[in-house]
């Protein structure tokens, strides 16, 4: 079967949905490769900084690893700006969505909100509110997000920093993306777990 016969999902058969499920599983297995390709594209993404967006991401992950962070957080640091190309106004949300099935709620929240927290370092120069993050001050992951931006984002634009390569992080990325933490409603409805 190369494709299903139905044009309305309500008309699909058990065999067609089994075929589609296998096709989807095969596609999902290639996700780490597509994420690595997206990271490589950051090398030529818009940047007025002294390092490329890829260089920034690698430096962020390198600093996280050298600080003794978990593999999950290291990969989150590596991917935190992966949404820049497709979602420049909500890049943190896109990066967090990519990571969500594979990371804890805490890591997901940090990456989702890091853009707002990063504004602390520059918004006041552009007439914005550098303390906009404070509206989330009561959240349990507030300080962790402040720390992420301080240690693994705002300081990761140094062209002289001894940054590790993408090849170094690839096995770690594959391990993190190899462990799905399905806690979302769609997975529960689909698989009953």
Image (cartoon, helix red, strand yellow):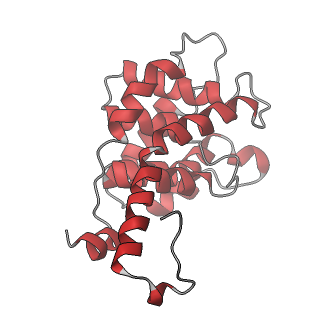
Q: Taking 119 as reference, is 111 left or right?
A: left
Query: Does residue 34 appear anywhere in the picture?
Result: yes
| Residue nearer the viewer, 165 or 163 | 165
Q: Percent x, y for residue 100?
A: 40, 54
Residue shown at 77% from the left, 33% from the top: 47
Q: Position of residue 117 (x, y in %)?
A: 54, 49
Residue name at image x 45 percent, y 18 percent: 168
Q: In the picture provided, is 79 more to the left or to the right than 128? A: left
**Which quadrant holds the C terminus?**
bottom left
Callout count: 0
Vertical relation: 31 (above or below) 188: above
The quadrant holding residue 179 is top left
Q: Is residue 183 above or below residue 154?
A: below
- Decide if residue 162 is on the left or right side of residue 175: right
| Residue farthest front in this picture | 1
Q: Residue furthest left?
A: 193
Q: Residue 131: tell me if it is visible.
A: no
Q: Is residue 134 above or below residue 41?
A: below
Q: Nearer the viewer, residue 158 or 59?
A: 59
Residue at the bottom extreme of this rendering: 10
Identify which residue is drawn at 70% across, 23% down.
Answer: 51
Query: Compared with residue 80, is residue 142 higher up or lower down, i.e. above or below?
Result: below
């Amino acid at each position: 079967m190369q494709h299903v016969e139905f044009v309305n999902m309500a008309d699909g058969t058990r065999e067609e949905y089994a075929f589609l499920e296998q096709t989807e599983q095969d596609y999902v297995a290639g996700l780490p490769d597509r994420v690595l390709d997206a990271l490589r594209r950051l090398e030529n993404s818009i940047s007025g900084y002294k390092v490329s967006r890829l260089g920034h991401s690698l430096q962020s992950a390198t600093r996280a690893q050298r600080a003794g962070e978990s593999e999950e957080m290291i990969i989150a640091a590596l991917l935190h700006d992966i949404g820049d190309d497709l979602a420049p106004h909500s890049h943190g949300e896109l990066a967090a969505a990519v990571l969500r099935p594979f990371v804890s709620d805490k890591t997901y929240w940090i990456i989702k909100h890091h853009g707002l927290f990063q504004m602390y370092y520059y918004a006041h120069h552009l007439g914005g509110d550098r303390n906009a993050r404070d509206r989330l001050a009561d959240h349990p992951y507030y300080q962790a997000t402040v720390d992420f931006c301080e240690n693994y984002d705002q300081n990761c634009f140094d062209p002289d920093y001894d940054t590790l390569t993408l090849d170094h992080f690839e096995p770690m990325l594959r391990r993190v993306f190899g462990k799905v933490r399905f806690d979302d409603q769609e997975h529960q409805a689909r698989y009953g777990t």
